Amino acid sequence: MNNTTTIQVRIDAKTKREAGKVFEGLGMDISTGMKIYLRQVVREKSIPFRPGRTINGFTPEYEQKLLKEEAWVLKYGKGYTNIDEMFRDLNA
């Protein structure tokens, strides 16, 4: 006899719908996806992803720093229309 138990999770409808689409694209339902997730937690004895990281893998603070630097470069940095112009500036 299979000894199983039930877990109930409350989550907003949008997240459930979007997760359902992802799992469906992988050929499974939400229940199967959650079982895989929980088995991975047990196997790794940890959450199988880095919480607190952005989609790019950075901490939110570091990504914010990069975005500020990029904004500065866009505002104050010099652009070039050709490589010869760039090398003239570099060699000056």
Image (cartoon, rainbow, N blue to C red):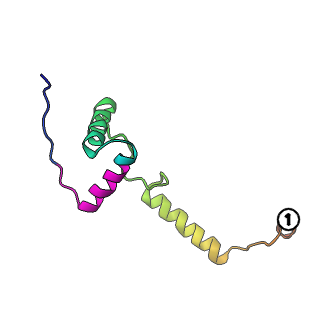
Q: Is residue 16 magenta?
A: yes
Q: Nearer the viewer, residue 58 or 48?
A: 48
In the rendered structure, the answer to whether residue 43 lies left or right of residue 3 reads right
Q: Is residue 75 magenta?
A: no
Where does the image place residue 50, in percent across and percent down from the top left? 39, 46
Name the residue at 14% across, 25% down.
Answer: 2
Q: Which residue is mark 1?
A: 87
Q: Tell me the kind of residue under disc 1.
A: Phe
Mark 1 secondary-structure assignment: helix
Name the residue at 51% across, 64% down.
Answer: 65
Name the residue at 27% across, 46% down.
Answer: 30
Q: Which residues are magenta?
A: 9-22
In the rendered structure, the answer to whether residue 86 lies left or right of residue 36 reads right
Q: Residue furthest bottom?
A: 75
Q: Main secondary structure of the magenta part?
A: helix
In the rendered structure, the answer to whether residue 49 lies left or right of residue 14 reads right
Where does the image place residue 71, in percent across and percent down from the top left? 58, 72
Q: Which quarter of the rendered picture does the N terminus lie within?
A: top left
Where does the image place residue 53, in percent across and percent down from the top left? 42, 53
Decide: is 53 above or below 26: below
In the rendered structure, the answer to whether residue 68 lies left or right of residue 89 reads left
Q: Nearer the viewer, residue 61 or 34?
A: 34
Q: Residue furthest top?
A: 1
To which quarter of the image does residue 46 belong? top left
Q: Nearer the viewer, residue 40 or 73?
A: 40
Decide: is 50 above or below 78: above
Q: Which quarter of the rendered picture does the C terminus lie within?
A: bottom right
